[in-house]
Image (cartoon, helix red, strand yellow):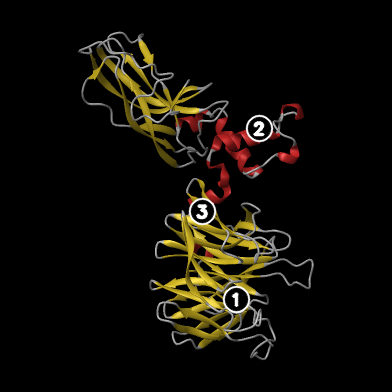
Amino acid sequence: MKASWQHALGDRRLLVSGFGRWGGGIYDLTDGEPEALDNIPTSGLALGGGRLWRALRAPGEQTAACELLSYDDQGVRSYERLDTIRDPHDICWHDDALLVTSSWDGIVWRTEPGRPPTVVWRGGTVPDSWHVNSLVAVDGRLHVCAFGRFDRHKAWRAGDGDGDRDGAATEGFVHDVERGVDVLSDLAHPHHPRRVGDRWLLCESTRGTLTECDATGRVVRRVGVDRFSRGLAVVGPWAIVGGNAHREDDDDRAEVVVVDLDSFTVVGRVRMPCLEVYDILPVPPELARAVAVGFGANPARAVEQHRGDGREPGRHSAPETARVHLVTAATAATLATAGELLDREAAGRCKVQATLPTGPLRSGGACTLTVTVVNDSPLALASVPPHPVRVGARWIRSDDRNLFRRGPLSALPRLLHADDRVEVEVLLVAPDEPGRYELRLALHQTGRGWFGRRTSGEVVVEAAAEPVNPVEPESAPVEGQPLGSVMRP
């Protein structure tokens, strides 16, 4: 028995972008039902440069600016507004840059941070005459997809130009930009071409099909999805195809259709909350999680949003009409739990790893030590109130176990997700009195105290050759230590 498409995904997550007159967003379809990660209408998705990229979608695209979001494994990494790009559709990472199609201008744009977009390719001179849409890189060469080479505005609409027996224009093509040739032609409003071995798969939108072509461009098979087909991902022996809602039916919704590529038959359908699907993309799990985190990559700010919602009106800094929510309520609530006291089991599954100094340290001197915090618990850790998690050191005198000194506590540099690790720069301030000490590095949470598995060992502290002005750990970071990294316990 053939394994399911979810099995073929492995540990990846399947994301679907959507929009429509009722809105849209990004949905995680991995478990077979759409889970909305946010409600920001979106068209193209792409992986590249270690990030997930996303083109936002809004009504009136021919006059609206192009907006791009990128995500790393912690959440939103960048937002960029590109005023010269109108009607953005698809995006593709190619030649170390993000490319964007503008269907209104018929242009493929190259975008780079801090630089104006540049034209890579152009089709047609009349606005939206060719309807340039999808992009794909095959064997290192960029391919662009369009509805046809027309000289009139929106002449590609069904019934215009040369049509097939269903009345749909069939002048669509897929063009190899580097070689300057069409690799596929005579297609009905093509979207999302994908090369799989020696075959092509793509959506013929107005036919409502997933279409397979051989290497010469000859159509081999078609299977109907009974909708305007758009959005395609190939997952092992399965094709995951998007289909838009029927516009004449107000109660209809978009669907995602599963096609068995061996039999070329539809074997499953998933109803979506939005009206239109644009893109479908398998991504690493940490990038799917990053979309859910979004602008909550700074957990302290997300927690403040969550707690601010619960304050009485007299303690709001702004009226409701002026308040901005950058993080979904569900994400803010989840991140707020990182500021609560850890239970015993979760605390016991956290640890600190470090290589301790091997040579003697000067009394009263200071240095920084890189330690690794490992979170093997099912909960996220963060240095957020009211019970922040931080890292610090304790010095225990070997000849007097009752004499010890606690060093400054260092904040975690970011939200530490479950089954994750992060490096932290910890400030070590050697005791004023020379001697042998047991140095313990461990996690600390306000209200709980020291917890988890620590790293410890003997360190020798020698008398300073000259008087040393002790570093005040509460306020004076040493050279090279970022301001704000030393936090008052």
Give the number of callouts.
3
The one nearer the camera, 125 or 396, is 125
The one nearer the camera, 127 or 347, is 127
The percent coordinates of residue 484 (x first, y second) are 45, 28
When asked about the image quadrant of residue 151, the answer is bottom right
The percent coordinates of residue 416 (x first, y second) are 47, 38
Q: Which residue is mark 2?
A: 307
Task: Indicate whether 50 appears above or below 316.
Answer: below
Q: Which residue is mark 1?
A: 131
Three-letter residue code for mark 2: Arg
Three-letter residue code for mark 3: Ser
- Ranked by sequence position, the earlier of labels 1 and 3 is 3
Question: Is residue 194 among the parts visible in the rendering?
Answer: no
The one nearer the camera, 143 or 380, is 143
- Ranked by sequence position, the earlier of labels 1 and 2 is 1
The percent coordinates of residue 43 (x first, y second) are 60, 63
Question: Does 361 sit left or right of 274 as displayed?
Answer: left
Q: Name the secondary structure under disc 1.
A: loop
How far apart marks 1 and 2 lie (CA) works out to 47 Å
Q: Name the secondary structure under disc 2.
A: helix
Task: Indicate whether 29 appears above or below 357.
Answer: below
When asked about the image quadrant of residue 198, the answer is bottom left
